[in-house]
C-alpha cells in the first residue's frame, strides 16, 4: 500500500514538472515578477564560452525556475505552508501578529555607524549652525509586541540612544521614537513595507517643528485621501507571502491651498504636484511620493516667507516633505546615494542656513554613501 502511494506521489510530481516545462516552452517569458519585485531570468544565449564556463547551465536552471508556470502561486503556497507549520520568518522577515510583516534587525556595525556619525558632525562643524538629524526606527521597533513568540531582534532604541549621545554636542538630534510609540494605534507604518506611512511621517514632521520652536499644522487641517488600498511593499516581496489584503496609501493635502513647483534637476522636468499618481499603477506604489528617488530636486512654494531648508535623505523623507512645504519658501532635497557632486559646495552656493538629515535607522547603519557629507 505504501509502495503504491509513493509511486502515485512520484507520478504526480513528475507530471506537474513536465507539464510546467511544456507550458514554459509554449508561453512567452515574463520579464518581471511584481510578486517578488525583481527581474526574471530570460532565455540564455547559447555560446561556446557560456557552455564551457558553466554559465549556460546556471542561467538555464534559473530560467526554468523563474519561468515555471504559476511560479507566484507556488511561492505563495510554500510561504503559507511554512506559516501553517509554525515557521516564524522567511528571508529575515517575521510573520507577525495581526498581519504585520516585521524585518529582523541585526546588531549593526559600529564602524559604519561611527563613520556616518563623524561625517554628519563634520558637516555640522563646517556648515550652517542649524543642523538636525532625524533617524526613523523601523516598524519592528514600534510594534515589537506583534513579533511571533521567541522572535529575536536587536533593540533599535539602543542604537538611537547611542547615536543621540554621540551627536548631542554638535547638532540637534530629533528623536521620533517616543512620538511614534505614543501613536502606534494609528496607521503609522505599512504592514508589508519598510517605510512609514504619510500619517507616521506627520508625527516626524510635528516633532521636528516642535524642536525648531515652530508650531506645526494640526492634522485636522489636512484633507486626507486614500489613493490605493493594494500596496504590497518590500517586506511582502522578501517574505514571499501570498496575501489578499494590501496596505493603503494616504496622501495629505492642506486645506489652506498654496502653489508649488517641484523641479527634478537631473531630468530637467518640473511639475506642480508633490504626488505622481500615475506611479500607483506600478508595483512600488510608494513612489507616488515625489516620484521615488532622485539625486537632486527643489520644491518652491508661494509660502509667505524667505526660509530655505536642505534635506539630505533616503526615501523615508518622501512622505514627510509634503508637510514641510507648508513652512518653507524653498526646500532643497539631496540623496547622497545618487548625488555625486560636493554637498558642501552646494550648501555654500545656495546659502543654506538649515539642514535636516533624515534617514531610516536601518539604512543609516548600513549606508556608506553618507561619507559624501565630508566632501
Image (cartoon, rainbow, N blue to C red):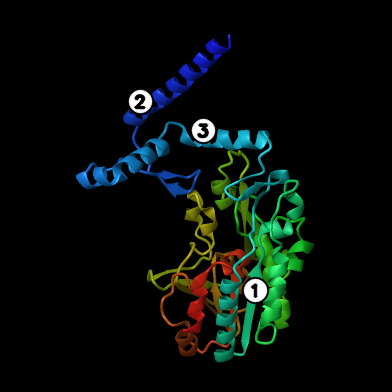
Classify mark 3: residues with Cα within 10 Å, few (<14), some (14-19) or many (20+): few
Classify mark 2: residues with Cα within 10 Å, few (<14), some (14-19) or many (20+): few
Which mark is first along the chain, 2 or 1?
2
The foreground one among 22 and 153 is 153
- Would residue 171 be found to the left or right of residue 373 on screen? right
- Residue at numbered disc 3: 74
Q: Which quadrant of the figure has residue 211?
A: bottom right
Residue at 54% across / 12% down in the picture?
3
The image position of residue 296, as x and y in percent, is 45, 73
Q: What element carries label 2?
A: helix
Return the mark for residue 134.
1
- Residue at numbered disc 2: 22
Quarter of the image with the N terminus is: top right
Which residue of the protein is positioned furthest toward the right in this rendering? 182
The foreground one among 217 and 126 is 126
How far apart are the two marked residues, 1 and 3, measured between alpha carbons? 41 Å
Q: What element carries label 1?
A: strand
Amino acid at each position: 500500500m505504501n509502495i503504491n502511494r509513493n509511486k502515485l506521489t512520484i507520478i504526480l510530481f513528475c507530471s506537474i514538472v513536465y507539464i510546467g516545462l511544456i507550458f514554459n516552452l509554449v508561453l512567452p517569458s515574463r520579464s518581471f515578477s511584481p510578486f517578488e519585485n525583481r527581474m526574471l531570468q530570460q532565455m540564455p544565449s547559447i555560446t561556446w564560452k557560456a557552455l564551457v564556463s558553466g554559465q549556460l547551465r546556471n542561467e538555464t536552471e534559473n530560467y526554468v525556475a523563474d519561468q515555471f508556470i504559476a511560479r507566484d502561486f507556488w511561492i505563495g503556497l510554500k510561504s503559507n505552508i511554512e506559516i501553517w507549520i509554525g515557521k516564524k520568518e522567511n528571508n529575515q522577515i517575521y510573520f507577525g501578529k495581526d498581519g504585520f510583516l516585521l524585518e529582523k534587525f541585526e546588531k549593526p556595525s559600529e564602524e559604519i555607524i561611527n563613520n556616518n556619525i563623524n561625517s554628519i558632525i563634520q558637516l555640522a562643524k563646517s556648515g550652517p549652525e542649524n543642523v538636525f538629524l532625524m533617524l526613523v526606527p523601523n516598524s519592528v521597533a514600534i510594534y515589537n509586541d506583534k513579533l511571533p513568540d521567541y522572535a529575536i531582534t536587536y533593540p533599535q532604541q539602543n542604537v538611537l540612544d547611542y547615536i543621540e549621545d554621540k551627536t548631542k554636542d554638535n547638532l540637534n538630534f530629533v528623536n521620533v521614537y517616543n512620538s511614534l510609540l505614543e501613536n502606534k494605534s494609528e496607521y503609522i507604518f505599512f504592514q508589508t513595507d519598510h517605510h512609514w506611512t504619510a500619517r507616521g511621517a506627520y508625527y516626524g514632521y510635528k516633532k521636528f517643528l516642535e524642536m525648531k520652536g515652530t508650531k506645526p499644522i494640526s492634522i485636522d487641517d489636512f484633507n486626507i485621501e486614500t489613493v490605493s488600498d493594494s500596496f504590497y511593499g518590500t517586506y511582502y516581496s522578501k517574505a514571499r507571502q501570498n496575501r489578499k489584503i494590501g496596505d493603503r496609501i494616504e496622501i495629505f493635502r492642506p486645506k489652506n491651498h498654496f502653489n508649488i513647483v517641484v523641479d527634478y534637476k537631473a531630468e530637467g522636468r518640473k511639475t506642480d504636484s508633490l504626488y505622481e499618481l500615475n506611479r500607483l499603477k506600478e508595483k512600488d506604489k510608494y513612489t507616488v511620493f515625489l516620484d521615488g528617488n532622485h539625486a537632486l530636486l527643489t520644491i518652491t512654494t508661494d509660502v509667505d516667507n524667505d526660509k530655505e531648508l536642505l534635506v539630505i535623505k533616503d526615501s523615508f523623507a518622501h512622505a514627510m516633505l509634503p508637510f514641510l512645504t507648508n513652512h518653507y519658501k524653498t526646500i532643497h532635497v539631496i540623496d547622497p546615494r545618487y548625488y555625486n557632486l560636493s554637498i558642501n559646495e552646494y550648501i555654500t552656493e545656495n546659502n543654506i542656513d538649515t539642514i535636516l538629515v533624515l534617514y531610516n535607522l536601518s539604512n543609516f547603519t548600513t549606508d556608506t554613501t553618507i561619507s559624501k557629507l565630508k566632501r
